[in-house]
Image: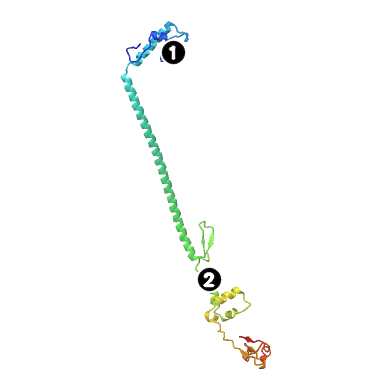
């Protein structure tokens, strides 16, 4: 059975057909503080009537249209949406503020780092100027820690140790007795190498060997006919090996 309203409402006859458990589970039971029920499993007729009256009253109150409530709900929805937008905007602004703060801190740190770099470069420039002066005036320079002393590398300097030694040898070879010393057999090979390497061309010119002269020994007879290339140093005559020690009473002969 439908009431005058759109939604159906419970009547006394309908309540009589319902079980007590359904009545207890109904939404109207929320107000059963006003209805005294002794046994929920077995309701009396009076309790059923009171429950029906309470349920009908609650249905009628819910069905009455309330424009103010609708407008209030709309306003509440609008306010809630506005609050949500405002909270989102505030959170975005806070995030931007944090980012800008971080960016400002990064800028300050970068500027601080740049300042330190500039100061370091200025210090390095001053140190380099000091090093240049030290290089010009001394044979060593001081490291950045101001404690370590580095001597100049001879290989990078204008005159190395090797070239200075070679120059001294070349200058010393102008003296005649050193040129004679270069021809000594007992002289070490390394010294002989330097002496012969930096010897002047006039001193190192060797005599051109003359052609070998083949002739008969002037002591031997004609029958032997010994041809030799040995010449006596004193008389400059050809002598064979047999008469080399007796010819002209000279022990050493020159062989061409």
Q: Residue furthest left?
A: 67
- Residue, disc 1: 22
Q: The N terminus is located in which quarter?
A: top left
Q: Residue at x 49, y 65 (%)?
A: 137
Is the residue 143 above or below the residue 250 in the image?
A: above
Few, some or many residues within 10 Å of mark 2 (<14, 14–19, 20+): few
Q: Which of 224/239 is in front? A: 224
| Residue at position x 40%, y 40% in the image | 99
Percent across and percent down for residue 235 are 63, 92
Mark closer to the observer (2, 1) = 1
Q: Position of residue 167 (x, y in %)?
A: 53, 74
Residue sitting at x 36%, y 27%: 80
Residue 66: percent from the left, percent from the top?
32, 18
Whole-Å distance between the Cαs marked 2 and 1? 121 Å
Give the side of residue 117 with respect to residue 68, left or right: right
User: How did the renderer colour the structure?
Assistant: rainbow
Residue 220: give x, y in percent of width and height.
67, 92
Closer-to-camera residue (55/15): 15
**Residue extending furthest toward the top:** 45
Q: Nearer the viewer, residue 165 or 193?
A: 193
Image height of 207 relative to 15, above or below: below
Task: Please determine whether, in this image, residue 14 is positioned above or below residue 154.
Answer: above
Q: Which mark is residue 163?
A: 2
Crowdedness near tag 1: few (<14), some (14–19) or many (≥20) residues, C-alpha within 10 Å: few
Q: Does dot 2 land on a helix, a strand or a loop?
A: helix
Q: Quadrant of residue 247?
A: bottom right
């Amino acid at each position: 059975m439908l009431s005058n309203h759109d939604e159906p409402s419970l009547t006394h006859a309908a309540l009589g057909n319902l079980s007590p458990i359904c009545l207890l589970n109904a939404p109207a039971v929320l107000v059963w503080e006003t209805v005294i029920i002794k046994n929920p499993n077995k309701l009396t007729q009076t309790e059923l009537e009171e429950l029906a009256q309470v349920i009908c009253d609650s249905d009628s109150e819910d069905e009455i249209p309330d424009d103010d409530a609708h407008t209030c709900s709309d306003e509440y929805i609008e306010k809630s949406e506005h609050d949500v937008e405002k909270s989102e905007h505030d959170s975005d602004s806070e995030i931007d503020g944090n980012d800008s703060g971080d960016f400002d801190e990064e800028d300050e740190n970068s500027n601080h780092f740049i300042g330190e770099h500039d100061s370091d470069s200025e210090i390095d420039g001053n140190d380099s100027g000091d090093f240049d002066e030290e290089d010009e005036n001394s044979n060593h320079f001081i490291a950045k820690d101001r404690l370590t002393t580095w001597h100049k590398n001879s290989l990078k300097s204008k005159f190395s140790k090797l070239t200075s030694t070679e120059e001294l040898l070349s200058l010393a070879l102008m003296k005649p007795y050193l040129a004679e010393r270069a021809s000594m057999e007992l002289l070490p090979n390394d010294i002989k190498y330097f002496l012969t390497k930096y010897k002047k061309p006039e001193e190192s010119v060797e005599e051109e060997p003359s052609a070998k002269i083949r002739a008969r020994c002037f002591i031997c007879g004609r029958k032997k006919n010994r041809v030799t290339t040995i010449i006596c140093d004193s008389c400059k005559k050809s002598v064979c090996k047999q008469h080399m020690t007796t010819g002209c009473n000279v022990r050493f002969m020159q062989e061409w």
